[in-house]
Image: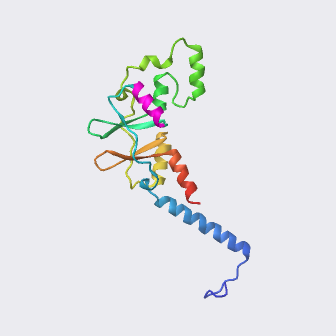
Amino acid sequence: MRSMQGYVDITPGDFREIYSIAYDLALKKVRSLRKAEDVMTSPVHCLHREMNASEAASFMASHGISGAPVVDENGTICGVVSEKDFLKKMGLPGTASFMAVVSRCMTIYGCLVSDFRGLSVREMMNCPPIVATRETTLTDISALFSKHAINRVPICDTDGRPIGIVTRTDLVASLCEER
């Protein structure tokens, strides 16, 4: 400290407090500057709106994902389908757990999903989709998650074609990377 012009005598405790405050402010600034393109998963697995529900479920299961953007014949995003949409079609709330599905299956004769095997993705998807651009900040994406109670945001180019996706998992992982 003595080498600094305008020497200020501070205790080690003061220094720790100043450092902690400065570190938190720097971290907040870095987080607000990170963008979707920094954490998005690409390429993104998309459903086609003419797929049927069974094909969509199989596709999502085989890729280990719980939701996906839906594209039209031009590759433009037109909706999003998630496991919440399947649960709603089964007559359960979108917040239901796997055990709620099991419990319901135990009390009803037949398969709960048999009633919508013939549905197309177009009939199940949430529309219009909540999307972002590669320049959208992670702070803004986090706000979209909260405001719309969603778990993923497709990242689109200027023509509305998906180029990536940011999930809640991606967002949480990005916080861990900065420490």
Part of the protein shown in magenta = 53-63
Observer-nearest residue: 78 or 148?
A: 78
Q: Considering the image in quadrants, where does the N terminus appear? A: bottom right
The image shows residue 46 at horizontal and vertical percentages of 38, 38
The image shows residue 59 at horizontal and vertical percentages of 42, 32
Q: Residue at image x 56%, y 60%? A: 178
Q: In the rendered structure, does residue 67 fall within the stretch colored magenta?
A: no
Q: Residue at image x 57%, y 65%? A: 25
Most common secondary structure along the magenta stretch: helix
Render colour scheme: rainbow
Q: Is residue 13 left or right of residue 25?
A: right
- Residue situated furthest top in the rendering: 109
Q: Is residue 21 left or right of residue 149?
A: right
Q: In the rendered structure, does residue 59 fall within the stretch colored magenta?
A: yes
Q: Is residue 159 left or right of residue 60?
A: left
- Residue situated furthest front in the rendering: 62
Up the image or down, 19 lies above or below 78; here it is: below
The image shows residue 141 at horizontal and vertical percentages of 46, 49
When asked about the image quadrant of residue 128, the answer is: top left
The image shows residue 10 at horizontal and vertical percentages of 70, 79
Give the total number of marks visible in the rendering: 0
When asked about the image quadrant of residue 131, the answer is: top left
Q: Considering the image in quadrants, where does the C terminus appear? A: bottom right
Q: Residue at image x 46%, y 61%? A: 33
